[in-house]
Image (spheres, grey):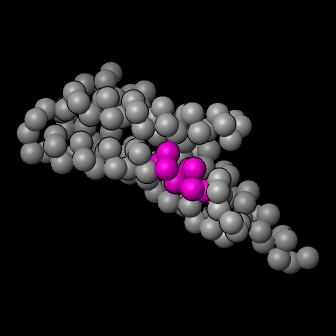
């Protein structure tokens, strides 16, 4: 996937999660998860942009690591919503899959960047 494609995809993920959180019940746990999920999903998009403007390879890798953590957190909260019966699985399954897919993409990117950095240093 191209960098531009991931710009669009991470922003779409954040927007879809924000819209999705409006369906959560207006109770303490629903509001708590809403805040956590909005923070983590929007962080995926903002840290992707920051990673692409990193001035050094170590900063790039650090930003990718943050993205991976935020994807994992988003996936956790989405799974929690389903497991706690706040919403049916059909409401969250697409977002769970997208969080998982983004985690895989960024994990592979980080692995490649670390490999390239380590091989450059050894030369």
Q: Is residue 49 in the magenta section?
A: yes
Residue at 52%, 39% (x, y): give it. 10
Please state if 79 lies on the left or on the right of 59 as rendered.
left
Residue at 49%, 37% (x, y): give it. 11
Q: Quadrant of residue 110?
A: bottom right
Q: Where 98 falls versus 29 (above or below)?
A: above
Q: Quadrant of residue 120?
A: bottom right
Q: Is residue 61 in the magenta section?
A: no
Tell me if I can see residue 80 in this picture.
Answer: yes
Q: Where 111 falls versus 82 (above or below)?
A: below
**Percent position of residue 46, x then y:** 49, 50
Tell me if I can see residue 68 in this picture.
Answer: no
Please state if 85 lies on the left or on the right of 64 as rendered.
left
Residue at 46%, 35% (x, y): give it. 13
Q: Quarter of the image containing the C terminus?
A: bottom right
**Nearer to the camera, 51 or 31:** 51
The magenta stretch is 44-51
Q: Quarter of the image containing the N terminus?
A: top right
Residue at 70%, 68% (x, y): give it. 56
Farthest residue, direction left? 27
Q: Main secondary structure of the magenta part?
A: helix
Please state if 12 lies on the left or on the right of 35 as rendered.
right
**Percent position of residue 41, x then y:** 40, 44
Farthest residue, direction right? 123
**Percent position of residue 42, x then y:** 41, 45
Farthest residue, direction top? 90
**Percent position of residue 31, x then y:** 16, 43
């Amino acid at each position: 996937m191209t960098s531009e494609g991931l710009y669009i995809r991470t922003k779409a993920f954040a927007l879809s999660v924000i819209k999705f959180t409006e369906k959560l019940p207006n109770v303490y746990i629903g509001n708590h998860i809403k805040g956590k999920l909005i923070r983590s999903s929007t962080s995926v998009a903002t840290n992707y942009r920051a990673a692409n403007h990193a001035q050094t390879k170590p900063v790039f890798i650090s930003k990718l690591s943050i993205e991976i953590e935020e994807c994992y957190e988003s996936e956790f909260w989405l799974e929690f919503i389903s497991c706690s019966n706040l919403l049916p699985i059909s409401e969250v399954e697409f977002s769970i899959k997208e969080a998982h897919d983004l985690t895989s993409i960024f994990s592979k990117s980080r692995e490649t960047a670390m490999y390239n950095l380590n091989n450059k240093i050894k030369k």
